[in-house]
Image (spheres, helix red, strand yellow):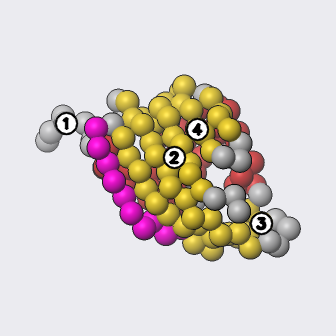
Amino acid sequence: MSNTPPSVRERLDDLIDYIRTGRIAEAMVEFYDEEAVMEEPAYGKTVGLAANIEREKKFVDSVKEWKGFDVIAIGTGDNVSFYEHTMDWVAQDGTEVHVEQIVVGRWKHGKIIHERFYYNMG
């Protein structure tokens, strides 16, 4: 048995599996550093694991029904990852939402320390 830590690619694959199976809150604890910064066009920067968990809970609570999460492309490098995906859901008010997004993560010691989301608010 090897003591080699998992690669960024292995960690990213696991993170995507958590998201795909709806374990978003669990993913936050497993894959994000205590001081993680998440940055996206609609909300700016959210600093710290606790604040990011709270923001994600609000997002999840706004969803009435999940329709899909499809990963189109994945890439990793030296402590950096990206994935392109689409997400579809129905909001609590019945609005159907479709998002096409790219997520870039910076990793340290197997945890995400900074994650930035790129999408068109159009």
Q: In this rendering, which labeled residue sits more in front, label 3 or label 1?
A: 3
**Considering depth in this image, is 91 or 73 the residue closer to the camera?**
73
| Mark whose residue sits in front, 3 or 4 | 4
Query: If you read the primary sequence from the N terminus, does the residue marked by circle 2 or circle 1 appear first?
Result: 1
**Residue range of the region highlighted in magenta in the rendering:** 69-78
Q: Earlier in the sequence, mark 3 or mark 4?
A: 4
**Residue found 50% across the figure and 35% down from its top:** 114
> Marks 1 and 2: in contact by CB < 8 Å?
no
Distance CA(mark 3)–CA(mark 1): 42 Å
Reading the image, the residue beneath label 3 is: 91
Mark 4 → mark 1, Cα distance in angstroms: 28 Å
Kind of residue sitting beneath label 4: Met
Nearer the observer, disc 3 or disc 2? 3
Mark 4 residue crowding within 10 angstroms, few (<14) / some (14–19) / many (20+): many
Q: Which type of secondary structure does the marked residue at label 3 adopt? A: strand
The question of residue 76 being in magenta is answered with: yes
User: Residue 38, which numbered label?
Assistant: 4
Can residue 4 be seen here? yes
Q: Position of residue 22 (x, y in %)?
A: 57, 59
Q: Earlier in the sequence, mark 4 or mark 2?
A: 2
The quarter of the picture where the N terminus appears is top left
Q: Which residue is mark 2?
A: 27
- Residue positioned 71% across, 62% down in the render: 122
User: Which residue has dot 1 on it?
Assistant: 4
Q: Nearer the viewer, residue 68 or 81?
A: 81
Q: Main secondary structure of the magenta part?
A: strand
The amino acid beneath tag 1 is: Thr
Q: Is residue 97 above or below residue 5?
A: below
